[in-house]
Image: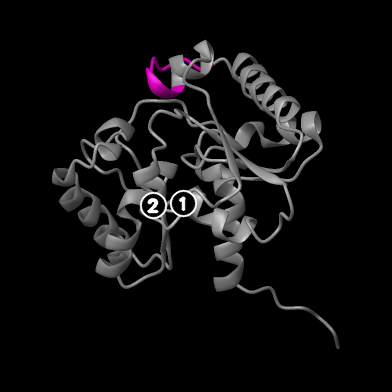
Amino acid sequence: MLDSFAPFIPGDVGNAHTFPFPVRYETVKGLNASNMVNWDDSHYPNFLEAGLKLTQSGVKAITGDCGYMAIFQDRLAKDLQVPVFLSSLLQLHFLTHLVHGDEKIAVITADSTLLTNSLLASINIDHTYPIVIQGLQNQPYFKDFALTESGVLDTNKVEQEVVNATVNLVQKNPSISIILLECSMLPPYAKAIQEAVSLPVFDYTSMIEYVYNAYIRKKFDFQ
């Protein structure tokens, strides 16, 4: 988890009630989205320490709460003995196989200025990927709670901003056929987005549940 101050409502990765299975959290001291994407390597020891604490507590896999954690993906995966899937953006490798022709994947991100080519390249995503990026850094209510970290969250206002931004993007780019929400604070609004644009919506929770279901298989009663 980033060292942040923001409300974690149900649906947010930071809220344990989001998941129908037990989860454990560790905060990376001093780490925020800005110093992370600026490749401040001095934070990696704290990042690794948090990962080691989780593995020592018995977790089966480790994820993150910010898509920009992609820059630490390969390094942490090599340093830990459990599967690591830090960024929601890792799903792009799968999603590209669900689009064809001129179809595009919309990436709704907290701050598009931080979602740089070098960050995407850290998980082998380049200009050939059919993505369209939309940042939310200019949406006042989202910016206030998620980026400025005021400690105040107006869910109705934020939902309206996120939905409107997505609808406008799809209207400008009718070839968009899939939505991917980068930020771990956006899953609470995934349903509203889907209802507004009638498209499949992927996010952190879809990725986490995918991995969980692989580790904890359901027994089917067929006898």
- The part of the image, by quadrant, that contains residue 40 is top left
Q: Which residue is mark 1?
A: 126
- The image shows residue 172, relative to residue 85, as above or below, that is above
User: Residue 187: image x %, image y %?
Assistant: 60, 38
* Residue appearing at x 38%, y 32% in the figure: 114
Q: Please, which colouring scheme is shown?
A: one colour
The amino acid sitting under disc 1 is Asp
| Residue stretch rendered in magenta on the structure | 146-153
**Which quadrant is the C terminus positioned in?**
bottom right
Q: How many marks?
A: 2
Q: Which mark is residue 204?
A: none
- Residue at (25% x, 36% y) in the render: 38
Q: Amino acid at mark 2?
A: Ala
Q: Secondary structure at mark 1?
A: loop
Side of 179 where 128 appears, left or right = left
The percent coordinates of residue 208 (x first, y second) are 54, 56
Image quarter of residue 56? bottom left
Q: Nearer the viewer, residue 152 or 87?
A: 87
Q: Is residue 38 above or below residue 207?
A: above
| First-in-chain label (2 vs 1) | 2
Looking at the image, residue 15 sits to the left or right of residue 191; the answer is: left
Q: Can residue 128 be seen in the rendering of this structure? A: yes
Provide residue 162's location: percent of width, then percent of height: 62, 24
Q: Which residue in the structure is indicated by mark 2? A: 121
Q: Residues within 10 Å of mark 1 (few under 14, many from 20)?
A: some
Relative height, residue 222 to residue 57 (above, below): below
Residue 218 or residue 85, whichever sits in front: 85
Circles 2, 1 touching at the beta carbon (< 8 Å) = yes
* Residue at the spot 39% in from the left edge and 52% down from the top edge: 121
Q: Main secondary structure of the magenta part?
A: loop
SS label for mark 2: helix
